[in-house]
Image: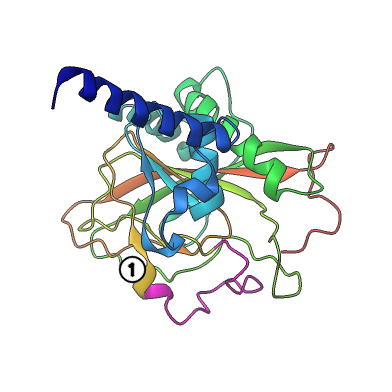
């Protein structure tokens, strides 16, 4: 192909892409643009430099998104060490066989690495963006709880479940979302060591939302494993079906779980919201 014709062809393609971008309101990252196939078909992944728009759109479309290498293995390990040297030496609430539960707020003098992860600007920005879509009646997004997740060798796969269930009458046109969860990988999350499984799209109105368990007959077959290197994070709606995998490795697998709640102006649960 002559050079002039090749240049013209490239220009036409670029203009076409630009027009498509403008037709989407100047934002290529919309929930509609991201789906492309049934939401249950994939676990959406982005890199550490992803934008708030892309992460928020992925949450709207799939209810879950993996942000690979958002932090470093060293920084996440430092946050874990802060818990080990601080709160874990005192009383903590056990929440099942694999979870330690710690309350907010974070101690800024002794938990700087932990605070940096909780206040990650990409996560907070995406949380605020989706709160405006799914958090009707809420005023802001607030850090709620810190959980340390340790899956020891031989730990069996957990049941698929929701952390919150919208008790509004089914079917729902737009289910309310209680908030978001983030799991940071302290260790590499692999299929062998029980990386968390998610059912993309299970936050949507076409799924029954009024119960805590996996009441959809295809839930198990639609679950996708959030494998990711240490320093990565998976962000998901509390209403998305999820559960740990089986740890068949010889070592434990650890993660940090932060909860972000959509709250009213006083910091409480908005009036009329059910569990």
Q: Residue 143: where, in percent of width, then height?
A: 63, 37
Left or right of 19: which side holds 104?
A: right
Part of the protein shown in magenta: 203-220
Residue sitting farthest toward the bottom: 217
Q: Residue 8: where, in percent of width, then height?
A: 29, 23
Residue sitting farthest toward the left: 1
10 Å neighbourhood of mark 1: few (<14), some, or many (≥20)?
A: some
Q: Is residue 58 above or below residue 266?
A: below
Residue in the image at 45% along x and 82% along y: 217
Left or right of 224: which side holds 5?
A: left
Name the magenta segment's main secondary structure: loop
Residue in the image at 76% along x and 74% along y: 169
Q: Residue 243: where, in percent of width, then height?
A: 42, 63
Residue in the image at 49% along x and 64% along y: 241
Q: Secondary structure at mark 1?
A: loop
In-front residue for pair 16/64: 16
Count of all numbered marks drawn on residues in the image = 1
Left or right of 17: which side holds 263?
A: right
The residue indicated by pointer 1 is 157
Q: Is residue 246 magenta?
A: no
Q: Is residue 107 above or below residue 137?
A: above
């Amino acid at each position: 192909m002559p050079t002039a014709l090749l240049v013209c062809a490239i220009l036409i393609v670029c203009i076409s892409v630009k027009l498509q971008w403008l037709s989407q309101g100047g934002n290529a990252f919309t929930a509609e643009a991201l789906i492309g196939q049934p939401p249950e078909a994939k676990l959406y992944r982005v890199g550490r430099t992803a934008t708030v728009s892309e992460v928020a759109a992925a949450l709207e479309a799939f209810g879950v998104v993996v942000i690979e290498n958002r932090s470093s293995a060293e920084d996440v390990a430092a946050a874990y060490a802060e818990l080990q040297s601080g709160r874990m030496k005192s009383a903590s609430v056990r929440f099942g066989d694999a979870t330690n539960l710690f309350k907010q707020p974070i101690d800024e003098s002794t938990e700087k690495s932990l605070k940096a992860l909780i206040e990650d600007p990409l996560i907070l920005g995406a949380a605020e963006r989706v709160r405006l879509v799914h958090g009707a009646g809420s005023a802001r997004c607030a850090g709620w709880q810190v959980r340390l997740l340790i899956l020891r060798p031989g730990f069996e796969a957990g049941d698929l479940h929701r952390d919150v269930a919208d008790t509004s009458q089914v079917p729902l046109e737009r289910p309310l979302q209680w908030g978001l969860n983030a799991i940071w990988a302290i260790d590499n999350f692999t299929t062998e060591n029980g990386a968390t499984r998610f059912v993309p799209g299970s936050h949507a109105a076409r799924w029954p939302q009024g119960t805590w368990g996996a009441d959809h007959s295809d839930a198990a077959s639609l679950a996708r494993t959030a494998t990711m290197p240490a320093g990565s994070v998976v962000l998901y709606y509390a209403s998305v079906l999820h559960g740990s995998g089986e740890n068949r490795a010889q070592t434990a697998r650890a993660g940090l779980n932060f909860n972000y709640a959509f709250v009213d102006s006083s910091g409480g649960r908005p009036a009329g919201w059910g569990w």
